[in-house]
Amino acid sequence: MPSRGQDGKLVFKIVYWGSSLSGKTTAVNWMFHKEGMSTSDKLQSIVDPTGRTLFFDRMSAGVGGVNFQVYTVAGQKRHKFQRKTVLNGVDGIIFVWDAQRDQTEENLWSLDELIGHLAGKLGKEIPFLVQMNKMDLPNLVDKNFVENALRQRDLGNVTNPHGIEMPTQVYETIAIKGQNIKRSFQQVARDAVMKFYLKMKQQGQG
């Protein structure tokens, strides 16, 4: 459920989720520095001495006149409590899957943790898609592998804002080059807004 900003406008919350070093912060940095999508002049980050996200990164973004708060979570396993806290009030999820084959176990662990926190809401009530990141590197899993992992967890399909089941979108991304970064964000942002307004319309008619 979106919140309201100081100006009274609705603010939707989009969270980037995934294992440590999967590319979450890089994706948000690209939108902030390269795409000019931020509505403020500051990207807030809380990092450890190595530069890894310690709690979250946060950016205020605007798409089509709608405001968003964009968060990333700290991917290290020890930050489980912080990750759960960031999910409070989430309106859309982008899961960043590190496509390197040797990161498969970490990806699956992170995905299972996310499913555990959101129970049956993920992909049903809360828009969800996957960025399959680092596609410019060698020794990668293929897209079919990721799609199979989603199907095995009952995430092969999501419910779109109109209540129709559709295959979960898996974007092949290269965050450091911006490949499919803006496009995938716009999709989950659009779905979050449409889902909210259609729900409000239905309640008004009821």
Image (cartoon, helix red, strand yellow):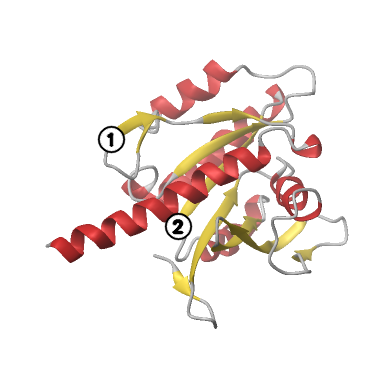
Residue 117 seen anywhere in this rendered image of the structure: no
Q: Is residue 27 visible?
A: yes
Q: Which mark is residue 131?
A: none
Viewer-proximal residue among 43 and 52: 43
Q: Earlier in the sequence, mark 2 or mark 1?
A: 2
Q: Residue at x 15, y 61 (%)?
A: 205
Q: Residue 74 location, x and y as percent?
A: 67, 55
Q: Residue at x 61, y 44 (%)?
A: 18
Left or right for 41, reference 55: right
Position of the C terminus, as image quadrant, is bottom left
Instruction: Classify residue 132 by image quadrant.
Output: top right
Outermost residue, left direction?
Answer: 206
Secondary structure beneath label 2: loop
Judged left or right of residue 183, residue 197 is left
In this figure, which residue is indicated by the disc labeled 2? 91
Q: Amino acid at mark 2?
A: Asp
Residue 6 place in picture, x, y as percent: 54, 83
